Amino acid sequence: MITKHSERFNGLDHLRALAIILVLLYHYRAFKHPVWIETVGKFGWTGVDLFFVLSGFLISGQLFKEMKNTGTIHVKTFYIKRFFRIFPPYFFTLFLYFTFPFFREREALPPLWKFVTFTQNYRLDVINQGTFSHAWSLCIEEQFYLILPLLLLVIMPTKLFKYFVILIILILSFSLTMRLITWSDSVGGIDNSSLEFWRLWYMEIYYPTYTRLDGLGIGVFTGYLMQHSERFKEIINRNGNRLFLIGIVLLGIAFWICNEQSSEAASTFGFTWVAISYGFIVVSAVSESSFLSRTRFYITSELAALSYAIYLSHKGIIHIVQNVFEYFGLENSDTISFIVCLLACIIVGLLYRFIIEKPFAILKNKILKVKDKSVLF
């Protein structure tokens, strides 16, 4: 019999697997690719937004649950767990990019200090320094991991915590407002077919943390309600499949709004609509009545477990595989090449797991055990 706890993670595993597939399809369009990738991968950029909603929901849910059970947040333990999960694979990937030029999918990298400080997503010139550009989302998540527990510690003892939902709505409104202002002042008046438009659009709208808070905000919003509203939780658990259908309909509307990713509508409220759509789908995935939580597939659970490693390394791996194909005179823009690239990304993800993630997970557990013993004595 599958417990409710594992059921919930089954549903989220399906969504993590979907998110990494979406991202892979979208980024593959930047390499030589079969024609069908152009259509199928068009909305793959929303995979990152799905990751944001998942992170906001899971991380905030853990913190809210700890606050309810213990009355506080053990920030040191939280940071230790995040450090050993995020940093070793990330810095290994940085080592590959900065040490082995053949790993780079493009020519120029931003300065190393921007990656090390997780500030690469600010003022990122993707046209001239686009190598490892996908680290922008990791920067936003790391900033989120740093700030959220500290924010909760500050407001938890105060009356402000009763108005936490309003605070999240204000944050979402702030992000939307910043995109509106940026579009009006910096981006909207430029020819959208020019390189300068795309450079500014990515730099000013797509990458900065303050313009991309929608997914994390929706995740935190739902995480809060799941922990602090029994009524909300009851509605979610009773209506899992209905919520999934609502999310799919909303996502279809979001795709219509964002048909042109860099249009004014997509660039302003389109991101918010995508985040809300995925919010419905995420809460449906943790519902006790949802088909997502009641089914488990080996492929999706494995892809979910490998998603971080694949996300980090996939552009470099695709670049290498396609270069090898070209060196041996093989076609590198067809479906067979795509399948080989996909398999290579999975294999490298497995190498990350056994060479980096598992050893550091063991070290993390040892450190946490020592920490727990020190508290006892």
Image (cartoon, rainbow, N blue to C red):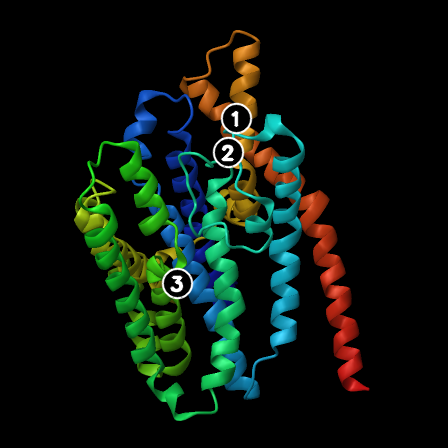
Return the disc, 3 or 2, that comes first in the chain's sequence.
3
Determine whether label 3 and label 2 are within 8 Å by CB. no
Depicted 342 relative to depicted 90: above or below: above
Depicted 19 relative to depicted 240: above or below: above
Assess disc 1: are there few (<14), some (14-19) or many (≥20) residues with their C-alpha within 10 Å of its C-alpha. some
Q: Which residue is mark 1?
A: 319
Assess disc 2: are there few (<14), some (14-19) or many (≥20) residues with their C-alpha within 10 Å of its C-alpha. many
Foreground of the two, 244 or 98 = 98
User: Residue 75 in the image: x percent, y percent?
Assistant: 60, 76
In the picture, measured across the screen, residue 167 lies left or right of residue 263, that is right
- Disc 3 and disc 1: Cα gap in Å? 30 Å
Residue 155: name its quadrant.
bottom left
Depicted 249 relative to depicted 311: above or below: below
Assess disc 3: are there few (<14), some (14-19) or many (≥20) residues with their C-alpha within 10 Å of its C-alpha. many
Residue 39: name its quadrant.
top left
Residue 315, disc:
2
- Disc 1 and disc 2: Cα gap in Å? 6 Å
Q: Which residue is mark 3?
A: 216
- Disc 3 and disc 2: Cα gap in Å? 24 Å
Residue at 36% in and 81% down? 164
Label 2 element class: helix
User: Residue 15 in the image: x percent, y percent?
Assistant: 41, 52
Image quadrant occupied by the C terminus: bottom right
